Amino acid sequence: MQLILLVFGIIIPLVASHRILTAKKHGADAVLFILFPEEDVPAVAYKSLGTAIQTFCPLQLWIGIIEDKIGTHYEVTDVLRLVDMINTEVYRLKKTSGKVQIILGGHGQSGSLIQQFVSEYPDVVSGIILLGARVMSDRILMQLNVPTMTVIGNLDGLTKITTLANFVSEYPDVVSGIILLGARVMSDKILMQLNVPTMTVIGNLDGLTKITTLANVYKKFLQQIKADPSLKYRYPMVVLDGVNHGIFSNGQLPVHLLIQDITLDTEYEKLLQDILQPISTFLLYCRGENGRVVLDSLNDYFVETNKILEPLLKAHQITIDPKEYKSHWVKQSQMWLSDLVGPDSTRINIESYFTYQSAFNPALFNESVSKVTIYLFSQLDTPVEKIDSDEIPLQIHARMFRRDAILKKLGIKQNDNSPERTCKDLNYASYVIAYNRSAEKIRKRFDKRNPGILFHEDIIIPSESSWNEKNILVTRHNRVLHVTSYAYITENNDADGHIFCTLLPPIRAMEWIYYGIYK
């Protein structure tokens, strides 16, 4: 096997399991940034990023890049061995007696491995940086006990992590920090449990680690920051505008990941500065430099990330309130179905709840002669059977009342023959709201690249049991999305007229606007 050492851009034999970029600056103490690559991406793909960070960062910065051979699967113990091997090699090469602080970085799926490592060996590293990687949770991240930065591009569509985090959780004493590049934050709880300073960096064009999923974790993270504002420095989540998943590896990704990512709108060289600044700042933070300049910079990233994620946070809030298991969207849908406007709209009170038991039919009661209350029980369908899941809900099985049933209960006569609203109308409204609340840049990109979304008439299902088994129908033809709802409708007998819809959650519609049409 050939051993490799990269010295000022010259590759010479050293170690087959990794590459080392020698520091460009001098000093007694040094920082060693060890980067674990995305699945099946060679170490050489990270040379441009590594040398750029060394040039930009004022520290004596050594960089070790793990050589990820196809089919290789690393365990937590492998991470410990590699960290020790590279650390020993750097001590030999730097020829000074100063200490070396270790920062771990993970791109994409390798992010979970280093998080697991730090959770088990928290004293080994000084920090973590996740690039396009998923943070397991806000609590586990903070339990890593080392500085952790998450850097995610808003076009990164791949980011999921399952391995690096495992290493950090098992060996938290080995590293000083973690850097996750385009890696997925797995949940708010895991984030805090890492207890290691952790930065997550994700692009808003990352097609693997989607910021639509990050937003739910970020919402819980904000609640933690309210109690302890210093957490925004120790666990910064950075969303970069115009950055995708592959940018960290100079565009090199295996085909099955590349087809999921979003194409950059800007050349790599023009975006490089945006990536280098937060990483360099966080390396300084992990090094113990907590002066005003460093903290102000981290706060600026916090403010900018809030702006980028705000539309997504609002879309999540409209879709579901996980604390009370309520749905503002189903409530609004029922109000639209009632067709009540003006003073009459105040005569209806709607309580809308989520449940995993789909057998509850809606209930309609008279509070008084002039007012009614409606209780709705809807089923939120997510990839994981958990109402507060960070995954985007696929649909809502909503059981609601038809217009005439409500009007009859209120004693209101319908004076015109206007048609009742349908499930199609509600799903189109979900899309319109998601579009209008998306960031302006995202809307412009969507309008430029999107060939269209068509909402078709409802498919009427003859029985409730059959409707329970149906999912909202979403197909793609010539890059056009076709959306159809399944509906079950009963007659308006004794104010029991029902309309059951498979509804499109606003947050899923927003994810289509951010990502779905480009695939």
Image: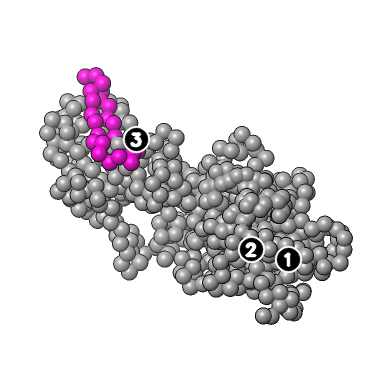
C-beta proximity under 8 Å, tags 1 and 2: no
Secondary element under disc 2, as helix, strand or loop, is: helix
What's the magenta region?
Answer: 353-376
Quickly name the residue at label 3: 353
First reached walking from the N terminus: tag 1 or tag 2: 2
First reached walking from the N terminus: tag 2 or tag 3: 2
Residue lying at 51% horizontally and 53% vertically, measured from the top left: 211
Residue 285 in percent (x, y) is at 73, 50
126 to the left or right of 310 = right
Quickly name the residue at label 2: 78
17 to the left or right of 500 = right
Q: Is residue 26 visible?
A: yes
Residue 146 in percent (x, y) is at 68, 48
Residue lying at 44% horizontally and 42% vertically, measured from the top left: 388
Amino acid type at mark 1: Ile
248 to the left or right of 392 = right
252 or 75: which is nearer to us?
75
> Which mark, residue 28?
none
Q: Residue furthest top?
A: 368
481 or 21: which is nearer to us?
21
Q: Is residue 127 visible?
A: no
Amino acid type at mark 2: Asp
Residue 140 magenta: no
Kindly report the distance in space between the C-alpha atoms of the residues bearing marks 2 and 3.
Answer: 47 Å
The 10 Å Cα crowd at callout 1, few under 14, some 14 to 19, many 20 or more, is many
> Which mark, residue 86?
1
Residue lying at 52% horizontally and 51% vertically, measured from the top left: 186
Amino acid type at mark 3: Tyr
Residue 404 in percent (x, y) is at 17, 35
Kindly report the distance in space between the C-alpha atoms of the residues bearing marks 3 and 1.
Answer: 54 Å
